[in-house]
Image (cartoon, coloured by chain):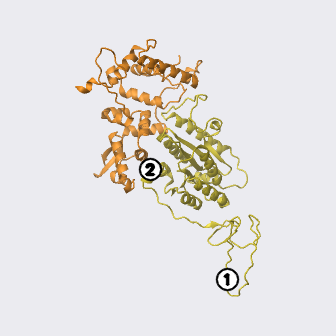
Chain colours: A orange, B yellow
Amino acid sequence: TPEMSRVQLQCKNLPEFLRGLSPPTLDRLYGHPATCLAVFRELPGLAQAGIMRMLFLEQPLPQAAVGLWVKKEHSREQQQSQEVLLELRLWHPHTLPGGLPGVALHPNFRQNLRVALLGGGKAWSDDTAPLGPDRHARDVPALDKYAEERWEVVLHFMVGSPSAAVSQDLAQLLVQAGLMKSPGTPPNPPCAPPQARGMDLVEILSFLFQLSFSTLGKDYSVEGMSESLLTFLQHLREFGLVFQRK
Amino acid sequence: DDELSLLIIVLDTNPIWWGKRALGEAEFTLSKCIDAVMVLGNSHLLMNRTNKLAVIASHTQESRFLYPGKRWAAADPFGEAGPSMESNSSGSKDGKYELLTAINDAIAEEIKDLMTKTDMKGQQTETLLAGSLAKALCCILLITESSKPLCVIKAAEDSALQYMNFMNVIFAAQKQSILIDACVLDSDSGLLQQACDITGGIYLKVPHMPSLLQYLLWVFLPDQEQRSQLVLPPPVHVDYRAACFCHRNLIEIGYVCSVCLSIFCNFSPICSTCETAFKISLPPVMKAKKKKLKVA
């Protein structure tokens, strides 16, 4: 087909990307506080308000009650924000006892956003205290320099500079992502999913979100990370996004 | 879009008022109130990467920043606040976003220190609210040009002694387009009603104290844009009577000094505030009528 002959990069924003996921995947994705936090932040204002209002309610709310939240002249904005929430499965219709239409918050999302907000759940990663202080600890300027160096190498590689070397794995990844073309081979379909590489999308996304809420310069444990996640971590290392201490 | 949005919460921690509560029913304690305040603060921080928070405890002896506290004061108080490399604190052990853990721990530590180690000196029983508001205003003006409304959570009764300072703070806020919100736990506050009315903030007397968190999230968390779209508590009828400077009584008709605008309930030839001597010729005393003289 004509579309296949052109390698296309589809850059979506987070909500758009999430809308493309299957419901079971989304449900699983909302199983981690960091993801819920990331998704919450990307929501428009009224949608955020809607979530916060329902977050500490133990029961679904009647649709009629929700309809009273917003002034009549802004019902369009309310409509739009409700659509976003429904598409992301953050809200779902729930019939109340008695038959009235109601609305409920996604249980995983509710639980994990509450954990991100209040605690009462599991730590995102193990405590690094048992490892002892890092004798070769890098400060923020050193980390910045490291990141820059690594990124330069990747860029040089991408423009075909012979001196720049990246791992086989990363080279393959760049081709599969449609960022580079392997000479002589037919172009791949756009954005080959990580599942094709034997990785779990939910696991990787959760980790990526966790990373986005981490503090620059702070140590985090990799204890208990799966094989595929550790591989992913190596990719991030090559891009200069994380630094691994010995 | 990446504008800094600062929420400052001023919490009335009057130890006498809270102490009396603790003796009565244990259902809603200062501890529970602080929990609700922290959830409000956390929620605000959750909504946007650039959102910032400050919490001020208004006590009878002082006004103290619970956060950012002394630890942050030296460094960049509203920078990338939270666990720094130097502290390398162990972070969150319970799944809470680690930035929130750091802030909540700091608040808990500071309030404990305030309530347990503060010497109760003198006869002071009233919350130093005007001072706390002034500190909050300074903080806002130092950090940013626009902020979310100042959220005041009031427990004890109004202090008549602070009337002048309070009104000054309100007008200063109004001039800087800073809104003052008030969430009142017990008896209505005439001063805060005026503050909300003059600055355009929301006034709410909480119908059921244990549900404080829900009120905070529903009414006080939404930002300006959402406030214009949401249905929120309507403005209350405000008692605009001034308090006389001599007795601190609320009066409807009085005497005003033309120089410093001090208000008195009774006539005096010299203003006690600015010591202006009034040069007026009193009309001849009439036998039957009572005349009210107004010096304006």
Disc 2 packing (10 Å; few <14; some 14–19; many ≥20): some
Residue type pointed to by label 2: Gln
- Give the tally of numbered discs: 2
In the rendered structure, the answer to whether residue B159 lies left or right of residue A77 reads: right
The foreground one among B81 and A180 is A180
Measured as percent of width and height from the top left, residue B265 is found at: 68, 71
Disc 1 packing (10 Å; few <14; some 14–19; many ≥20): few
Name the residue at the left extreme. A1
Question: Looking at the image, is B92 positioned above or below residue A198?
Answer: below
Name the residue at the bottom extreme. B288
Measured as percent of width and height from the top left, residue B159 is found at: 64, 59
Q: Are marks 2 and 1 on the same chain?
A: yes
The foreground one among B279 and A85 is B279
Measured as percent of width and height from the top left, residue B100 is found at: 52, 37
Q: Which residue is mark 2?
A: B226
Quote the CA–CA distance across marks 2 and 1: 55 Å
Q: Which residue is mark 1?
A: B290
The foreground one among B266 and B91 is B266
In the rendered structure, the answer to whether residue B113 lies left or right of residue A202 reads: right
The foreground one among B239 and B3 is B3
State the SS at label 2: helix
Question: Looking at the image, is B197 positioned above or below residue A162?
Answer: below
Q: Chain of mark 2?
A: B
Whether residue B127 is visible to the viewer of this picture, yes or no, is no
